Image: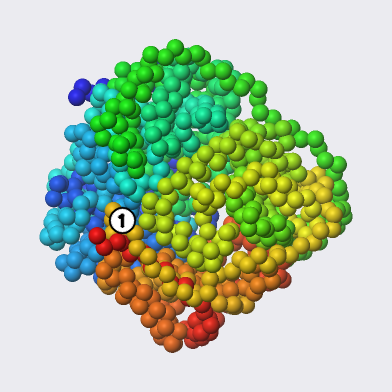
Amino acid sequence: MKNRITSLIWIVLAVIAGLPAYAADTNVVSGKLPNGLTYYIYRNESPAGRADFFLSRGVGSIVEREDERGLAHFLEHLAFNGTKHFPGNSLIGWLESIGVKFGENLNAFTSVDQTVYNICKVPTARESALDSCLLILRDWSSDITLADKDIDAERGVIKGEWRHRNSASNRLLQRAAPRIYGSSLYGQRLPMGLMSVVETFPPQRLRDFYNRNYTPDTEAIIVVGDIDVKKMEKKIRKMFGNIKKAKTPVVADRHVETGMPFMAVAEADPEQTTEMVQLFFKHPAVDGLSQEQEARAELVSSLLTAMLVERFDRLELQPDAPATNIGVGDTRFLISEPMRTLLVRGAVRKGNAPKAVAAFYTEIKRARDFGFSAAEFDDARKQLAEDIATTLDKNRDRSNTVIARSLSKAFLNGETLKTPQEEHDLRVSQLDSITVDEVVAYLRSIVNTDGTDVLVLLYTNYADAAGEKGEQALKDAFFSVNALTLEPYNPEEAPVELKLKEPAPGKVVSVEENGPFGTFVVTLSNGLKAYLRPNKEKPGQIYFRGVGMGGLSQDYSEADAGSLKLLNEAVAASGVGEMTNSDLRRFTQGKELKVSAMVSNTEETIEFSASPATLEDAFRLAYLKVTDIRRDDKAYAALMASKENSLANRRLNPVQTMGDSITCNVYSHHPLGGQPTAEMLASVDYDTMLRIYRDRFADFADFRFYVAGDFDTDSVKMMLERYVASLPVGGRIEKPRDIGYRFSPSKDVKFSRTMETPVAVVYQFRHTPAEYNLQNVICASAVGQLLKARLLADLREKRGWTYGITTHGAITAGMNGDDPSEFMLPVYVKVDPDHYAETAQIIDATLADMAAGNITPQELDKVKEYMLKSVADSRKDNAYWLVVLRQYDKTGLDMDSSYESCVASLSPQTVSAFLGRVLAGAQTLRLTMTPNQE
């Protein structure tokens, strides 16, 4: 194929490409050791006493040979199963002893082009903990054990992950990729690899792969957090400097063909629930740009996609819209970093794929031929400017993990590092000089009307839509657009404004300055009360929530169940005041401003997140949301079309079938308990939903309000006077009604399904009344964590039957009327079909063993350490305080002040006794799905 490098009028290629990303950000200490290893160290004091450790490697599955397919990912697994200084599972065990939990704070991923390991939220008080984390990174770099027994034991785990991830969409990509990528290895190197290789490769082959590809010149060590940078640099240079330099550089064939003729690929899978069309306009990524060029290119791309998104959103609102859930982006092409693509995708009804392709290309070609209006461009540029400002505010308080991932990305992509302020200033300096002609020139450079580098990809469950006949129909649909006489786009020119007839304000009548948890308790003239908790831990972040009692239970009838079930989605698709839903989206685009209203079975809630700059708009929108919801028939119709499309074939997917079965059975087949069904949509009524919603927010007499974050107290008081003290209060005090919404009694349900990838799912759900108090909440959480750790050790590490375990223990508030709170313990395991019965027995036996007093101090200490570390981190989060304040205000329970002492007092005997009590009276629902025996 002829290679073609896109030439853009706004790009002047830099002379030097592909150099390592040395830090321009002066907060970063970086360097390269003689053996080629790169390191980055960044001091970040928020949160205090925490650090993240990353090992990033620019090597992924692309370097595999044909008989090694899957070994890059396999090697990533083995890094946790034995290294020189941490044999067996001691690496995971030691990290969990300091509160670093496997799967949450300790993880890794392998992609086609990279492998990244991370150890996050490490306590830094002990110097020895920092040394040990560096030693782990050093072992991962060059001293993974790779013992025969560990390799053989992990084959089953990898097979379990394959079963877990081998969904219809992944199978479709596996079949399509070789055709899409042609001679490029990207079509043959998906990270999961081939099970025929995974199950049979000799152990020495993995060791050879490790020694050949895990070399220091491909690696970066990244440490971010509350650390002494100079001391850390000395440690890194000493610990990693003696790793031998690679004799032969790792060579990865990353070529992707360009200049390819039009291609349509249509693949069918019987479990694909949604017919999905994707239209790609491929263009090579351009390396070697200066910082200014790179920033400008990204801004041009962002402006283009913003204007296209607006057009396609309006297309989706048309009565005969060809697709739902339309998305637009200028991003990486599928799995290959060297190739980018302008992408339009959407879900279509059966047989409508060609129509959608024609509609997508029509709008792209219209923009290519006629460009964009000044109003469209000004709107997009304004939104982007707001987004740039918002990003700077967010980045003033970046977490260690966000910073570490940005350093990893810079290393892997060869980017120059910049501070948030430098990034902001660079983008601002470029934005004002970009013209609409520049954006259109970029679009014209990547959209070829002759079909060059154009791909249409269809995923379907409809066999007749795939194959040569289906692909020809897609091709004909694309090229039919070239024969059309198009006209320029006629956008809505009027700018979007938030119009509100300001309500008559009330007054603050009293302020208690020493309220619970450091709050100001404000009482307003209409009798409503608000708890204000200023918090500077998250600069620029403000959370607001108002909660009233009653919920859907006040208006429940089985005939209206469909409307009640979809009410919140319909409200989210509606407008407010004089603004349509589209206006709302345009108004909030790029702003740190999200407002939502929800009605659950027992409560109604209005909430927002905002910044100090958007706080007044947030209050105004929240006021409109609860006092002047606006019917939007176009947006509602689009929502219903999307729901119909997504639900029509939901039962084709066995995993979704199991999920639906779980929710239906857990809630005793209550109409509000299960997932919405296609049949339920026939009974849904927009008028009914809006009527019920308006009634739920017609009287605020039993509401309480909570505000937490980076705000000026006097300013918030003024907002409360305007937009909360003016809310209607008529004296309606409600409590949830009994609508029969309860957990299921004990029963055993078994069923089978035809599956493309045979897998069994074992699900158990235990519940029993239990008092809601801090001791029980902590005990329940500890039970869930202990059970998960034991089941992972047994079912995954010992037996290799599964990839993962999903479980947690909790005390849930009464869900129905005056029902008491309950202990709940769900367990979900995808397992080898040959072992589902034994898996269920092992879950039962493990719980019985724990309840019998066989919990060790060592395993409980790991859980306690994690809980103590987590609550310390949570206290910096404004969302945490909204929950704590609501619980205290509603029940009088303080779930925070005694948390550490309660956790510290936990003993194995305490947890065992608690588990014994709840199991003694527990109802147990058992659901099992197995593959049909063909």
Nearer to us in this view, 91 or 284? 284
Q: Is residue 746 visible?
A: yes
Name the residue type under label 1.
Answer: Met
Nearer to us in this view, 157 or 591? 157
Compared with 613, 893 (above or below) is below
Which image quarter: residue 791? bottom left
Compared with 268, 699 (above or below) is below
Quarter placement of the N terminus = top left
Q: Which residue is painted at 20% across and 55% down in the image? A: 195
Q: Position of residue 804 (x, y in %)?
A: 36, 64
Question: For this view, does 801 lie left or right of residue 778?
Answer: left
Compared with 610, 416 (above or below) is above
Colouring convention used in this rendered image of the protein: rainbow
Q: Position of residue 409 (x, y in %)?
A: 37, 43
Q: Which residue is painted at 26% across and 63% down in the image? A: 933
Question: For this view, does 282 lie left or right of residue 765?
Answer: left
Nearer to us in this view, 44 or 577? 577
Which residue position holds label 1?
A: 755
Question: For this view, does 718 lie left or right of residue 169?
Answer: right
